[in-house]
Amino acid sequence: IIIGSLSNWLLPLMLMSSDLIFPRLNNFSFWLLIPSLILMMMNMMLSNNINTGWTLYPPLINQNFITLNFIIFSLHLNGISSIFSSINFISSIFIINNNNFFFNNITLYIWSIIITTILLIISIPILSSAITMIILDNNLNMNFFNPLGNGNPILYQHLFWFFGHPEVYILILPGFGAMSQIMNQESGKMEIFSKINMIFAMISIGILGFIVWAHHMFTIGLDIDTQLYFMSATMIIAIPTSIKIFSWMMTLNGKKILNSSINFWSIGFIIMFSLGGLTGIILSNSIIDIN
């Protein structure tokens, strides 16, 4: 919702344009979601619905049901829609704003969309390749993930979480950009506190999101050195996120807090995000996470 609906609404306004650069591609990416939703709903309507969890792990996914193909085709259509939207957003930003694109001259929300679209374009093909291998395993008797044919089910986990962890930041980065715009507007200041550092913090979060995926996989038998690396890399993400929290607090500093829903939502967001981030630092420790 944040990257789709809000971006279609806010990006043209912030870029001072009447529409995105490819309106027909934008329309096509939306209508792809309809058959994707229909295929996903058909799985719940048919009797042979699969029970594999949301991660679709093999060998649980090794079932020759047609509903499995519906789910995978649905995910493919959703991924194509997301890639088309990402291409449209990033093209609109760089083409419409071509003569005025400076590092500090565009809003934080636009920066969040730039980083998010890059994450989507890189990560979605990884998931698409993984679920395509599942279809080939189940329908053409290939053995990418089947251990009986020298396949490796752990390979799927690596592919899935290489997509899955950047997806976390794909969901939250547009929210960071939106909250930065809201707090800047409500504070009455010219720009948010330490805008350059906020931009670098979002870029750092996007980069680090690609190198920490195996902290979801501590129980598969990773060696100590690998666990130590992913544990340390996960903790490092706390640095750019702390910069963002500090900048938000300093932006609101010196402002009279009015009894408005916007201010309450902003303060509540900072509190909830801070508490959640603290638990993430603790659970990034592999020993605590496993126990």
Image (tube, helix red, strand yellow):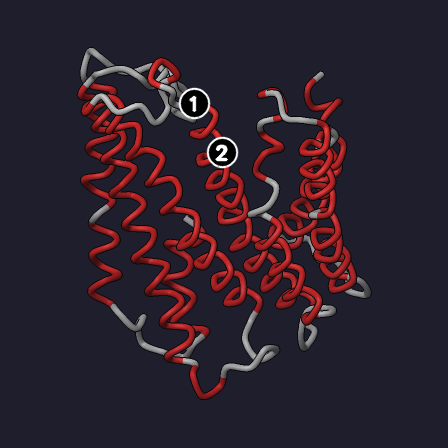
- Report x, y in % for residue 192: 68, 69
Label 2: how many Cα within 10 Å (few below 14, some 14–19, many 20+): some
Viewport quadrant of the C terminus: top right
Using the image as rendered, state which of residue 30 and residue 183 is in the foreground. 30
Q: Is residue 160 above or below residue 238?
A: above
Residues under numbered marks 2 and 1 in contact, where contact means CB atoms less than 8 Å apart: no
- Report the disc number at residue 196: none
**Given the current orientation, which residue lies at the most extreme bottom position?**
99
Q: Which residue is under mark 1?
A: 153
Give the SS element for disc 2.
helix
Q: Which amino acid does the dot numbered 2 rest on?
A: His
Q: Is residue 282 above or below residue 147?
A: below
Q: With 229 as the anchor, is 80 left or right in this view?
A: left
Whole-number angstrom distance, CA of label 2 to CA of label 1: 9 Å
Q: Is residue 143 above or below residue 238?
A: above
Q: Is residue 275 visible?
A: no
Using the image as rendered, state which of residue 93 and residue 190 is in the foreground. 93
**Given the current orientation, which residue lies at the most extreme right position?**
254
- Report x, y in % for residue 81: 28, 50
Query: Splitting the image into 4 quarters, where does residue 271 fall?
Result: top right
- Report x, y in % for residue 285: 74, 30
Q: With 149 as the anchor, is 153 left or right in this view?
A: right
Q: Which residue is under mark 2?
A: 158
| Residue at (43, 81) in percent of width and height | 97
Q: Which amino acid does the dot numbered 1 rest on?
A: Pro
| Residue at (72, 33) in percent of width and height | 225
Q: Is residue 86 visible?
A: yes
Q: Is residue 237 above or below residue 291?
A: below
Q: With 149 as the anchor, is 261 left or right in this view?
A: right
- Report x, y in % for residue 35: 18, 40
Q: Earlier in the sequence, mark 2 or mark 1?
A: 1
| Residue at (58, 21) in percent of width and height | 220
